[in-house]
Amino acid sequence: MKLLVLNGPNLNMLGIREPGHYGSESYSSLVERIGEYCKERNIEVECYQSNHEGALVDKIQEAYFTGVNGIVFNPGAYTHTSVALLDALKSVSIPCVEVHISKVEERESFRQVSFVRTACIETITGHGLNGYFEAIDILEKEQK
């Protein structure tokens, strides 16, 4: 099994940015933990983060051509603004789980909208960084 863990804008600032919402663990620590978690399950994983919408679209499209079986996606602020990311996910038809560290449904009103959600098999919000591992588990079960 091959997974892509994709993170949008500002997720590289984990541990620094609003720790009350996002916790104190760094992005590099999260990537390391995901790598270890996947290795234990014999899952090939690539983690990728970009602050640029087009780079995320490119990575989703690349996933199609490189045999990725599932995408764990935290689009960050692009969740609420990007039809391009929705269209990219729809075009590749790779099972995707949307992840949000904070409980977006209890935050500002603009965070209530998710453009990517309709292209995802499930959404996890408010479980902190554990949401990434839950998403991996969902995608692993999806492959069986």
Image (cartoon, rainbow, N blue to C red):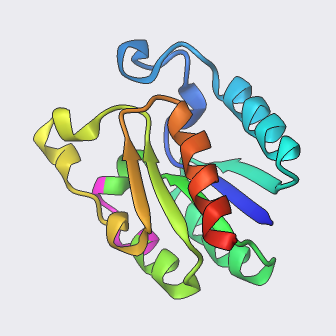
Range of magenta residues:
80-85
Q: Is residue 82 magenta?
A: yes
- Residue 85 or 33: which is nearer the viewer? 33
Residue occupying the point 63% across, 51% down? 136
Res 59 seen here:
no
In this picture, residue 101 sits left or right of residue 8 = left
Q: Is residue 127 above or below residue 118?
A: above
Q: Is residue 27 above or below residue 8?
A: above
In the figure, residue 130 lies in which quadrant? top right
In this picture, residue 42 sits left or right of residue 30 = right
In the rendered image, which quarter contains the C terminus?
Answer: bottom right
Residue occupying the point 39% across, 54% down? 123
Image x and y of residue 95, in percent = 56, 72
Image x and y of residue 75, in percent = 46, 52
Query: How many marks overall?
Result: 0
Spot the residue most to the bottom: 91
Spot the residue most to the left: 109
Q: Is residue 50 above or below residue 106?
A: below
Q: Is residue 123 magenta?
A: no
- Residue 144 or 120: which is nearer the viewer? 144
In the figure, residue 111 lies in which quadrant? top left
- Residue 43 or 23: which is nearer the viewer? 43
Image x and y of residue 58, in percent = 64, 71
Chief SS of the magenta region: helix
Q: Is residue 102 above or below residue 84?
A: above
In this picture, residue 53 sits left or right of residue 1 = left
Res 86 seen here:
yes
Image x and y of residue 124, in percent = 40, 47
In the rendered image, which quarter contains the N terminus?
Answer: bottom right
Residue occupying the point 41% across, 61% down? 122
